[in-house]
Image (cartoon, helix red, strand yellow):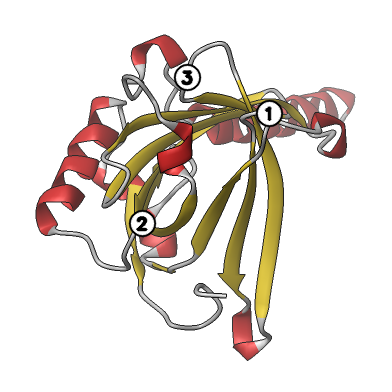
């Protein structure tokens, strides 16, 4: 009897350990910032303003579960110290109005790289990096985000547009970039445009 209880306990422990490992192993490893492109001669004054989120790709994104998402916008307000106040405006579910998510991106040692300001407000996050991979400033941008939370590394790439629609060529370029970082088709999704909230 005691032996069967021990065996059952070990079996349950093995299952729990296996499930915990599976959830971590399913995350595609986050690339080093050094291997991610960085926009040459980044011009912070030209990057500021409203961007629409047209596409997302990341190691925690799953197309089969999420399919598409409702477009939202992000406004980059340049401050005197070259940091950005960043406000994302999202549509709440069930016509409950708009949701605002405000944070600060502090410039790093390289132009186009940022860290999350006021980290003490986010105790679960150990690190948070932002890097503008490429942009033409007036049509599109691809921005890389990497965070470490609860000892797991997550990363995503956001495809921004100055307008709500981008060309199929730019979307294909975004897909190629995401795949170059190890992501698969199932990790890439595109937004459904909306007129709610995002132009506020």
The answer to which quarter of the image holds residue 129 is: top right
The answer to which quarter of the image holds residue 66 is: bottom left
Give SS at disc 3: loop
Q: Residue furthest left?
A: 169
Q: Position of residue 134 (x, y in %)?
A: 30, 32
> How far apart are the alpha carbons under marks 2 and 1?
38 Å
For the residue pair 185 and 99, the one nearer the viewer reads as 99
Q: Who's the residue at 61% across and 80% down the image?
A: 93
Q: Position of residue 79 (x, y in %)?
A: 66, 39
What residue is pinned by disc 3? Answer: 111
The answer to which quarter of the image holds residue 69 is: bottom left
Q: Who's the residue at 69% across and 39% down the image?
A: 104
Q: Would residue 181 be visible to someone looking at this image?
A: yes
Residues at badges 2 and 1 in contact (C-beta under 8 Å)?
no
With 65 as the anchor, is 176 left or right in this view?
left
Q: Residues within 10 Å of mark 2 (few under 14, many from 20)?
A: some
Which sits earlier in the primary sequence, circle 2 or circle 1? 2
- Of the numbered discs in the image, which one, if any, rests on residue 198? none
Q: Residues within 10 Å of mark 1 (few under 14, many from 20)?
A: few
Q: Where is residue 133 in the image (x, y as percent from the top left)?
A: 35, 29
Of circles 1 and 3, the one toward us is 1
Q: Quadrant of the C terminus?
A: bottom right
What residue is pinned by disc 1? Answer: 81
Vertical arrangement, residue 107 with respect to residue 99, above or below: above
Q: Residues within 10 Å of mark 3 (few under 14, many from 20)?
A: some
Q: Position of residue 171 (x, y in %)?
A: 19, 51
Give SS at disc 2: helix
Q: Who's the residue at 58% across and 68% down the image?
A: 90
Of circles 2 and 3, the one toward us is 3
For the residue pair 182 and 163, the one nearer the viewer reads as 163
Which sits earlier in the primary sequence, circle 2 or circle 3? 2
Which sits earlier in the primary sequence, circle 1 or circle 3? 1
């Amino acid at each position: 009897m005691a032996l069967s209880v021990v065996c059952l306990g070990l079996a349950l422990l093995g299952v729990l350990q296996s499930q915990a490992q599976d959830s971590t192993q399913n995350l595609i490893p986050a690339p080093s910032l050094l291997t991610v492109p960085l926009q040459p001669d980044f011009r912070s004054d030209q990057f500021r303003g409203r961007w629409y989120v047209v596409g997302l790709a990341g190691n925690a994104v799953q197309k089969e579960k999420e399919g598409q998402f409702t477009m939202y916008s992000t406004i980059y307000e340049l401050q005197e110290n070259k940091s950005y106040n960043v406000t994302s405006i999202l549509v709440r579910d069930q016509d409950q109005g708009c949701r605002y998510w405000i944070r600060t991106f502090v410039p790093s040692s390289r132009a186009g790289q940022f860290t999350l300001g006021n980290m003490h407000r986010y105790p679960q996050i150990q690190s948070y990096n932002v890097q503008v991979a490429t942009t033409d400033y007036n049509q599109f941008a691809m921005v890389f985000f990497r965070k470490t939370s609860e000892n797991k590394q997550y990363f995503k790439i956001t495809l921004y547009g100055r307008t709500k629609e981008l060309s199929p060529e730019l979307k294909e370029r975004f897909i190629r970039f995401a795949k170059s970082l190890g992501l698969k088709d199932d990790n890439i999704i595109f937004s459904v445009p909306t007129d709610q909230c995002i132009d506020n």
